[in-house]
Image (cartoon, helix red, strand yellow):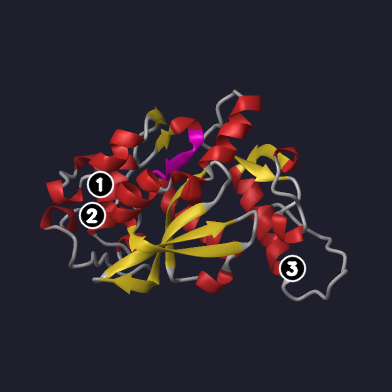
Amino acid sequence: MESPTRVPKQLPRQIQDLPAGTPVSNVTIPESMQLTPFLKHFEQTASADCGAMTSASVLRQVDADFVSCLEQLGGKTFRHGLYRVFRGDQIEDATSAIQRVFPEYRENIVAFGYDWLGRHFAIDKRRMEGGRPLVLMLEVGTGQAMQIPVPIMEFHNTELVEYADDALAQKFFQQWRAVHSDPIDSDHCVGYKIPLFLGGSDTLDNLELIDLSVYVEICGQLRNKIKTLPAGQTIKDVVIA
């Protein structure tokens, strides 16, 4: 049985007192935690209910900034799918899925968003600055993780605003959109037909629209199989549950 919820002390009192399952939209966010710069630069093009507060196990791992980000952005799509933030009720499953791709980060990350290429963004509890976890980009198609040296609020208000191309491959997205004008549904991404870690090319003709969960699962199985195989070995028996 799961132990009683222990919400981190850094959370404002109004958030500490909320039980798991409380709608995030019921929380009033202090001005210091607003994401105004991000919202000024990133047009919201679709949205869903931000979802209930995450489970007790997730709440024990996050701070006030994470909850604030979720309240303001959860379930929303920006710039036609360039970037999205998970709903509160998706975070636990999304975190488990990306941990299977990158088992070396198991127990240390909590996912909060993803981009059009299916790359996940998470807080990394092993890397802290001023008592706040820093952001990690987990690139499903390349099999690599990239450390972003800022906490979650600065990630949105500064990194995404000033370095959108570096963080979200914005120019590549525009090239894709010029050919594929249909919107990318929130449960899909544009993935590599042949992942880059298997020698695929980082070009438009190696991209396809694919179910996000299927893409994460396939790339995870492939990535973890090749770690123990000698060069030239054939990979088989990839199973989608």
Earlier-in-chain disc, 3 versus 1: 1
Relative to 56, 46 lies left or right: right
Whether residue 30 appears in this view of the structure is no
- Residue 82 lies, with reference to residue 137, above or below; the image says above
Relative to 107, 211 lies left or right: right
Q: Nearer the viewer, mark 2 or mark 3?
A: 3
Residue at (77% x, 57% y) in the render: 199
Whether residue 71 is in magenta: the answer is: no
Give the spatial CA distance, label 3 vs label 1.
Answer: 40 Å
Check disc 2: other Cα within 10 Å, few if <14, some if 14-19, many if 20+. Answer: some
Quarter of the rendering containing residue 209: top right
Q: Secondary structure at mark 2?
A: loop
Residue flagged by tag 2: what amino acid is it? Answer: Pro
Q: Are marks 2 and 3 in contact (CB under 8 Å)?
A: no
Q: Secondary structure at mark 1?
A: loop
Question: Which residue position holds label 2?
Answer: 19
Q: Secondary structure at mark 3?
A: helix
